[in-house]
Amino acid sequence: GALFSVWMAARVTRPVLDLAAASRRVAGGDWGTRVAVRSADEIGELAGAFNRMTQQILEQRDRLVQAERVAAWRELARRLAHELKNPLFPL
C-alpha cells in the first residue's frame, strides 16, 4: 500500500520535475532542450508538446537569422548602388 503510493507519486512527480528543469534550461537560452516522453497520459502529452514547442522555437530562430542575413545583404547592395551612382570623391 504505502510503497505503491510512493511509487505512484514518483511516477507523476519525476516527469513534472523534468519538465520544470527543461523549462528553466530553455529560459536560459538552451532552446534545443528536449524531454523524454515516457507515457501516453497527460504528462506524456505535455512532454510531447514541450518538445514540439522547442523545435518550433529553433526553426523560427533559424528563419529569423536567415532573414537578418538577407536584410544585411540588401542594405549592403543598396549602399553600394548609391555609392556607384554618387561617389564620395569624384575622379
Image: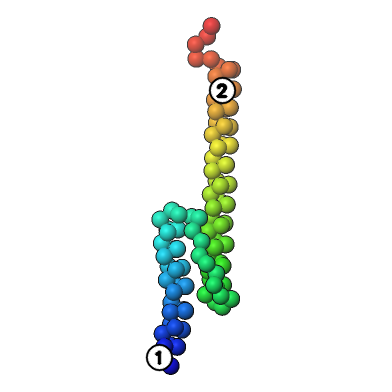
Q: Which mark is residue 80?
A: 2
For label 2, the crowd category at 10 Å Cα-Cα, with few meaning under 14, some 14 to 19 and many 20 or more, is few
- At which x and y percent is residue 35? 50, 65
Q: Which residue is depicted at the point 56% across and 67% down?
A: 48
When the figure is inspected, residue 63 is found, relative to residue 83, above or below; the finding is: below
Which residue is pictured at 54% across the width and 63% down the height?
Answer: 51
Task: Tell which tag, 1 or 2, sits nearer the viewer.
Answer: 1
Give residue 59's position: percent from left, percent from top.
57, 52
21 shown above or below 12: above
Check contact, mark 1 vs mark 2: CB within 8 A. Answer: no
Residue 45 falls in which quadrant of the image?
A: bottom right
* Circle nearer the N terminus (1, 2): 1
Q: Residue at x 49, y 58 (%)?
A: 33
Quarter that holds the N terminus = bottom left
Mark 1, secondary structure of its residue: helix
Q: Which residue is mark 1?
A: 2
Location of residue 40 by image quarter: bottom right
Real-space Cα separation, disc 1 to disc 2, in angstroms: 76 Å
Residue that lies at the very extreme toward the top in this rendered image: 91
Q: Residues within 10 Å of mark 1 (few under 14, many from 20)?
A: few
Amino acid type assigned to the residue bearing label 1 in the image: Ala
Q: Which numbered marker is on residue 60?
A: none
- Give the percent coordinates (x, y) of residue 24: 41, 62
The kind of secondary structure element at disc 2 is helix
